[in-house]
Image (cartoon, rainbow, N blue to C red):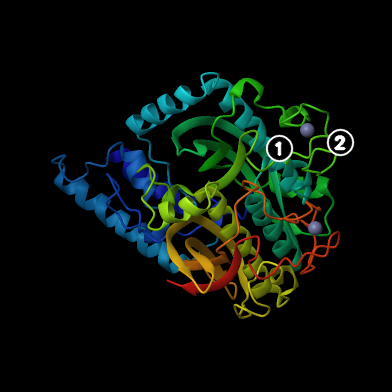
Amino acid sequence: MRALCVFALLGLFAGSSDARPGGGQSYRSSGSRSSGSSSFSHSSGSSHSFSSSGGGGDWEGDGNGPLVALCFALVVGFIVYWGIKRTRGAQARAAVEEEQQVKGEGLAALHAVDPAFDENAFAARVRDLVTRVNNAWVEGKMDAARRFISDGVYVRFATQLRLLKARGIRNAMADAKVLSAQILAAEGDPLWDTVHVKISAQARDADVAATLSTADAVAAARKSSLNAYQEVWSFVRRRGKSSASAGRVQEGKCPSCGAELPASEVVRCQYCKALTNSGEHDWVLAEITQPEEWSPDGIPVIDGLPELRARDAMVSVQALEDRASVVFWKWIDARVTGERKRLERFCRAEGVPAAPRADLSQVAVGAAEVTHIEPPQDGYDRVHVDITWSAATNGGEPDNMTHTVTLARAQTAQSLRGLSSLDCPHCGGALAESDSISCQYCGTALTGGRDEWALEAVEES
Ligand SMILES: [Zn+2]
Ligand SMILES: [Zn+2]
């Protein structure tokens, strides 16, 4: 109990900082996932600091009446202080909940389909990957990390970098260190396996003028406080692939045929045409979830998924969430910059949905989850994905929001390319940076939802 109070007080005076890759420092949660021993509301954005330091959080039953009252007053004071201070950056971050049984059962199931899966080797590769993503982020270009991350994660980082740049700043990091990467859970369906990894890391970071040199930016970051944080990084791979050839991409080789890949951001092997970041051949980083939104509850039942899968055997929830993430970030980009050109090619109809202009900063996505799939109507299938996110409006304090993204795709289309959704669905032309609404190589229209899930609506829920 005493430790708990001290921790709460420390939280008051910890230094503030800004974005790191993923924007987690700025993330504000809604409290919708409050569970277990953390009985405090998540609305302060720091509630887990109490339960995590309290070791089980049984704070009402220890018989220390006056001490409890004092602590309660301090805690209430802390929450009020948070509300008033409205500082940027979360000081004492939430911790990730762990569930040993979920982990054990999931890993056993994964071993059954992939006996070569090695927990330690996997964790070591993830640590390396986190470092590479951090380095790319600091460089201000995600190219060097693109091969290992899904299109959704790539767009998220690239958009965040662009929004920072638009405000004349860049995010610098120093003393970044991955403290541990521990497998939290594994889950699978007949088509895809997913492994969730708890990343514990620390870094100093600061937002500096975009004009500063990298050396000066890092020197500025070095003056910031050292902040520890946790996130859940989720990796997806086509079921049936063996870990015997895992990690090739990190060695600069094609995950499918093993050929050397050129030293660039290219994600398609020139020999066998495999996409390195589709999840079809090796694990790919498909989602980053903030601790407040992490739930070890296992795979939810999704209405309409079995019906869609009966018509499109390869459809995957992971790919749908990745696609929703891509279009959501494009929508945020359009709202902040007032330019729809990067959004348009992902829309079903030109000019729809509206992207009302807003001065958003510190944008961070907590989670993306498919909620249900509608029966086909007017020739289209429709998927609803809830995006839980937070952002500051007009330079204020970040608020938590949930928006439902509706994706539509022609009923006759098939899912063919795993998590890859930026390149041309017809000819495979590299279109990651293209704003054109048709493929520059083969002329195929990218809008309309004929081949790919297209954005039809975004609504606050
Ligand atoms: Zn190849
Ligand atoms: Zn094309």
Q: Nearer the viewer, residue 44 or 194?
A: 194
Residue drawn at 52 percent across, 36 percent down: 200
Residue 168 spot, x, y in % from top left: 77, 66
Give the residue type at disc 2.
Pro
Neighbour tally class for label 2: few under 14, some 14-19, many 20 plus, Cα within 10 Å: some
Name the image quarter holding the C terminus. bottom left
Q: Quadrant of residue 109?
A: top left
Say which residue appears at 84% left-offset and 35% top-offset.
271
Rendered position, 375 above or below 323: below
The quadrant the N terminus occupies is top left
Image quadrant, ligand 1:
top right
Identify the residue at horizontal 21%, vertical 46% (top origin). 67
Which residue does the numbered mark 1 point to in the structure image? 132
Front one among 325 and 378? 378
Residue 163: x %, y % from top left: 70, 64
* In the image: residue 303, left or right of residue 16: left
* Secondary-structure class at tag 1: helix
Secondary structure beneath disc 2? loop
Horizontal side of residue 78 vs 181, given as left or right: left
Relative depth, front residue between 175 and 263: 263
The mark that comes first in sequence, 1 or 2, is: 1
Looking at the image, residue 65 sits to the left or right of residue 236; the answer is left
Where 109 sits versus 417, above or below? above
* Residue hosting label 2: 262
Tell me which amino acid carries mark 1.
Answer: Arg
Work out whether residue 70 or residue 444 is closer to the camera in this orientation and state it.
444
Expressed as whole percent of the image width and height from the top left, the position of residue 239 reads: 54, 34
271 versus 265 height, above or below: above
